[in-house]
Amino acid sequence: MTAPVSIPAAPSASLTAPVPAAMRDAIAEQLAGIACEAGRILKGYHGSDCPHVIKPDGSPASLADTRSEELIVTALRHAFPGIPVIAEETSGTAQPAALFFLVDPLDGTRDFLAGNEQYCVNIGLIQGDRPIAAALAAPGLGRAWAAGTTAREAPIFEGRPGAFRPVRVRAAPADGLVALVSRLHGDSDTDACLERLPVGERRVASSALKFCLIAAGEADIYVRCVPTMEWDTAAGDHVLTMAGGRVVGPDGDTITYGHHARFYRNGPFAALASAAYCDALVLPQQSAVSYFDRRRAGGADAPKGA
């Protein structure tokens, strides 16, 4: 593999579209460094009584989210001046451009506040309507992923990514697929999709980590029919795609980004190790309401322990 072009962190590193393919792996590694630095902030709050509020949509936002986002936005604006940053907590209504960043400073906030270590930081660089460079850091697990034209994983040491190694999706196991399912956001549409596939095991996982576990060859499929936002998925989508997988919507086409008119909301999607699984997928056209949200709203038809 050709060595990636070095990307300095100074303002002179301004990028314009189209970004050459030879630069994308280096950009991804720089994003991984920023994500890991944000992860150091998150680790400092994890396991404590982190101050938080409940947003109008019912999801929590914590002081850890805010501090992480402040670091990421500052770092991106310094290293990549002029490129808009669309971030969950502070700039989720900003307009996209030919190049823009999608940032989730703490994906899995509810699990984070509950003490679960499967939370992550997501940073994706979008060109047009698809990611071209991305990074995720899972500080609680000590793992980071980066993808430009290749997908790679590194251990996290003292808040920095170590040496990266390539990752690749696996072939379908003979004893059935491993499907990753949400700890909190199950729904009947997702259950129906999985029942049409040769799933041998359902394994609980949180946050965008699910994309990376498939990319690393540790699982095979993740179906999501309840609402998500573009900053939840862009970075993981790119890591998985560069590892040989796909992320598709109800029509079987690759999902796209930068949909300001719909407030950056995703529709149903499936993250797949192999496009061969598409033939058996029947995704709904509209996002469902999760069992968790139905319970929170007082619905009586949600299963106990969902």
Image (cartoon, rainbow, N blue to C red):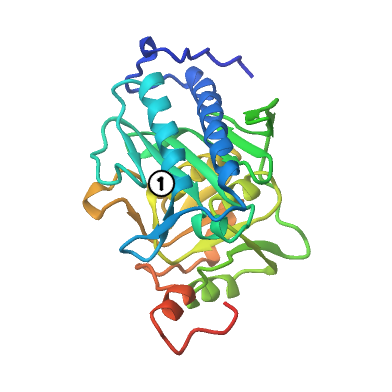
Q: Amino acid at mark 1?
A: Trp
User: Horizontal placement of 144 versus 149: left or right?
Assistant: right
In the rendered image, the vertical position of residue 234 relative to residue 85, given as above or below: below
Numbered disc 1: secondary structure? helix
Residue linked to disc 1: 231
Say few, some or many: other residues with alpha carbon within 10 Å of mark 1 (under 14 / 14 to 19 / 20 or more). many
In the rendered image, the vertical position of residue 1 relative to residue 197, given as above or below: above
- If the image is split into quadrants, where does the N terminus sit? top right
In the rendered image, the vertical position of residue 10 relative to residue 45, given as above or below: above
Is there any visible trace of residue 163 in the rendered image? yes
Along the line of sight, which residue is nearer the eye, 37 or 259?
Answer: 37
Question: In the image, residue 281 lies at what x, y percent?
Answer: 51, 66
Question: In the image, residue 148 lies at what x, y percent?
Answer: 52, 29
Along the line of sight, which residue is nearer the eye, 234 or 162?
Answer: 162
Residue at left 63%, top 50%?
214
Question: In the image, residue 209 lies at what x, y percent?
Answer: 59, 50
Residue farthest to the right? Answer: 175
Along the line of sight, which residue is nearer the eye, 273 or 15?
Answer: 15
Residue farthest to the bottom? Answer: 300
